Image (tube, rainbow, N blue to C red):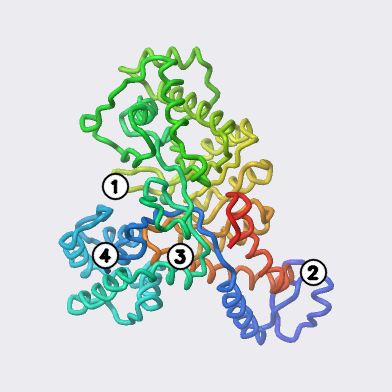
Amino acid sequence: MQQEKSLCLEGQDKSVYSEYTGYTMISMSDTSKTSDIKDKLETALWDIPFICIHAHLDPKQLTAQGLHHVLLYHMPLSELYSAGMPNGNRLSWYATKDEAKTRIKEALPYLKYVKNTALHWLTKKILSDLYGWNEPITEQNWTKIDGIIARKSTDPGWAREVLKRANVAGSSTEYRLRDKGQADDILTYALEWAFFTRAQQHQNDSPLFELEWTWSQDGPAAPLPVNIDRKKFIAEKRIATLDDVKEAMKHYISLVPFDKLVCAANHFSTEINYQDVTEDQMKKALKNRDHATEQDRDVYTCYILQEYLNALEHASKRIVFTFSVGAEPMEHETASLLPQKTLGQLINVFAKHPALQFVCFSSSVHSDQALCTMVRELPNFSLAGYWWHNFFPGYIETIVDNRLDLLPANKQIGFFSDAYHLDWLYGKAFIVRKCMANVFARKIARGQYTFDDCIDIAKQICYETPTKLLNLKKA
Ligand SMILES: [Zn+2]
């Protein structure tokens, strides 16, 4: 039986086996060789520059301002909250010293419960590699490492040094964070403004509100928060007719600084049914705005999405439509949930706009097979990285392994950080390289790739493909 042949047995005639299966076998005595190859691959991967196509880096605070930004980045923060830390809210974007101190002190008693997690490993790696800190964080010593990080953040060369150590050539971030452009040498920009395709709980007219909120703005601003209190957000103009929708979209598009952007960042809620919508359906749904149903919400969303995609297709400069999917809101934060139905509907949206490139950030490892099959059949759809709930070594390795087998190298992007500070971009670049080295070592052992193939493929998916797809200048 073929399967029995694949068992690794000491002393078996490898050449016969290889001839029979086409694979190279690894004997027990070869395990040290495999770990040698893994180490060599990992070292070689550090020489390949990565591009980060999605992050939330802020030129006003590119690196962590204190321990809070490393310890309480939203992903490890979730684990601490789960372990019992009383406050599960994310840190304020510009946290005060008092807020930082309170939150760190609240976290300390729960660190002992997350020693086992991959994210805690990355926290330790960041503190060790970037700040030379190799001790457990305690009530007695946390102010010391907090001070080291805070002092480093005032060094004008530190951000670029961290990026260099991560060997990341550059990162995309939200355009509204650009400030005076002081980090234009290392950042590119994504339009992250109105979220037309994100549902708000119990607000079926939310797609109209997203659009009319921008109607009185004079440029890209912060996106509306999730589950907004509408009493606190009163738009100056109200959308009542189809002409209003068209007028508001015209205003929105006229303010998009296409020459400064490489992509638009969006999110598709899975609650919405993505379908073709006619003008008559939209007119009818608009009349029902004050008592809008979920069906009306779907009509608003799909009509506005069609208008938006048509405008992007005909814009002076084509930007890539990136989107996240598969982190669905719960009472607190989100969970990895992605119904197949949503993917089945989205594939039709992408197929109808062949001039646009769509790039997906999925947080659902179990949907990766469906997503890969979509990419295989659509020339304008690609996958990037391992978003949020997928960013754990086991999932990353599974995804890298399967995508390498299923997708052309110019249809997959091997990395993005989603980091708020370069410290976590460093930590994430570290773990992705380690996971890739493990996957490549297995493929070498299988006889699928040579060492040189691995390096060439890694260069393509981590540097060449994002550079070409987002039309970036080569470093
Ligand atoms: Zn993000």
Q: Is residue 330 visible?
A: yes
Q: Earlier in the sequence, mark 4 or mark 1?
A: 4
Q: Give the residue type at disc 1.
A: His
Q: Give the residue type at disc 3.
A: Lys
- Quadrant location, the N terminus: bottom right
Residue drawn 63% across and 52% down?
468
Quote the CA–CA distance across marks 4 and 1.
Answer: 21 Å
Give the percent coordinates (x, y) of residue 297.
40, 25
The circle drawn on residue 21 is 2
> Would you identify the image quadrant in which residue 15 lies?
bottom right
Please tell me whether mark 2 sits on a helix, a strand or a loop.
helix
Q: Nearer the viewer, residue 171 or 434?
A: 171
Q: Give the residue type at disc 2.
A: Thr
Quote the CA–CA distance across marks 2 and 3.
Answer: 36 Å
Residue denoted by label 3: 428
The circle drawn on residue 68 is 4
At label 2, counting other C-alpha atoms closer than 10 Å, the crowd grade (few under 14, some 14-19, many 20 or more) is: some
Q: Is residue 325 visible?
A: no
The circle drawn on residue 81 is none
The correct choice, above or below, for 411 with respect to 100 in the image is: above
Q: Earlier in the sequence, mark 3 or mark 4?
A: 4
216 left or right of 409 in image: left
The circle drawn on residue 332 is 1
Please tell me whether mark 1 sits on a helix, a strand or a loop.
loop
